[in-house]
Image: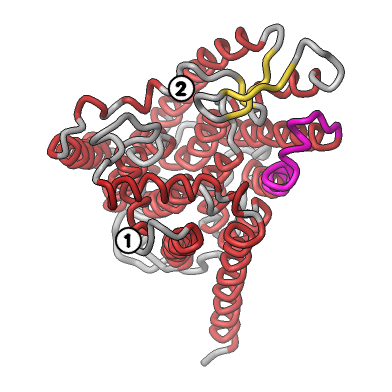
Amino acid sequence: MTAPVRAGLTSRTRLWVAFALVHGWLTVLGVVVAPSSSFYDVDLYRFWMYQGLDQGSWPVLDHTWVYPAGAILPMVVPGLVSTWSTAGYALAWCAMIAGLNAGALALLLSPGSRPGGRGRSLTGVSTLGAWWWLAYLLLMGPVAIGRLDAVVAPLMMVALALATRSERGVALASALLTFGAWIKVAPGALLLPLAAAVRRPIRRVVVPAAGVCVVVVAAVAAGGGMSRLFDFLSTQESRGLQVESTGATPWMLASLVRRDVVIRLNEKLITYEVSGPGTASAARVLDLLLPALVAALAVALLVARRRGHAAESLLPAALTLLAVLIVTNKVGSPQFLTWLAAPVAVVLTTSAGWLPRWASVAAVVGLVAAGLTQIVFPWEYIPLLTGNVVVSTVLALRNVCLLVILACGGVGLVSVARAPRGDVVAAESRGPAQPAAPVESTT
């Protein structure tokens, strides 16, 4: 066995040991140290599955629910272990998340066929993305595994990784993203840049996505829940600006010095929102800003496609779109940051020795944002609600980091779209998302 091979094996062994330690630590934090705050939602999942498995009353099928119908599946898996024990369900939940993350990590580290499906092995797969992802999870804290978003985050990572390897992988990526959207809506947004990045979007993206939707709708219809299939969409209409959201930042800072800006509990949704002069208008602006930014992103994708750089647009577009969904969201829950891990980890893994500047900055700022997020939630959330200046400042800095990440993705996408027109056939033959050579010195 050669020295480089031994070094590689040692490095991967250390990586898997670190994986186990990180997930073990996050499990201890969520199950033992701070279960009532960081794993409150997990116990809510247990209650819903108790109602279904033990009492026969299922979300969507029997009553209105805040989540899409597919969310029942990941919740019911740990419910098969226990619906009576809070700790038992939580441990089973953590084991499930660790299993999903292990699968995503294994794919990140595995060699695969080169884009274009020619069957040649990828060499020099970087472990940088894997190490970055573990650091990101550790810095985010227990919320990184204690929410439903922890299920869709590895699905998005696997989907993007598959899409960067071959056009054949795009169909599976589309199916995974659609399935993820039936659990939590965000993964479905990535179908837009995925469709723009391939030569046959109808065949590779639309058909697999439609197939998954048919299966889900048929299952819900068979259970008698068709009338409630899309009820989860209406739950967002009554939301104001949640305290953690980026849009709420000016008012959260103003609440420290103004009595007409207050933090109140939305009892219907059990979330804390900031209320004061202009907050209602800001919420309406965010509702308009989201589709406007998505439309701008679609234009950039179209330009990149026409210039023969569709493949290279996938990862920066994915990061931009996910950041848009967070920055323009009235909710701003801390677990949303798990979404950003997928495009960053994949681009770090597939960089092949050359890392775009936008990706480098996004990776560093992402780690800072993750660490600041854990400070706010779960450890200092109560002081935040009671007007603590230090914690409010930490939250504001975290939200500035999110804006920087959005800008990084936008710069990367615009750089790809503005690159000189190349040979379209040659560019597309590299596959759906092969990392491109530097297109501008500013990226």
Please name the amino acid that badge 1 sits on.
Answer: Leu
Q: Residue 80 carries which label?
A: 1
Query: Residue extending furthest left?
Result: 222
Residue 390 place in picture, x, y as percent = 85, 36
- Tell me the tag on residue 287: none
At numbered mark 1, what does the secondary structure look like: helix, strand or loop? loop
Q: Is mark 2 on a helix, strand or loop?
A: loop
Mark 2 is on which residue type? Gln
- Measuring 51% from the left and 46% from the top, which residue is drawn there? 343
Q: Which of 73 and 442 is in front in this view?
A: 73
Which residues lie in the magenta part?
368-389
Q: As displayed, is residue 259 above or below residue 191?
A: above
Residue on which the image places disc 2: 236
- Disc with the residue nearer the chain's start (2 vs 1): 1
> Residue 310: x percent and y percent?
41, 36
- Can the viewer see residue 414? no
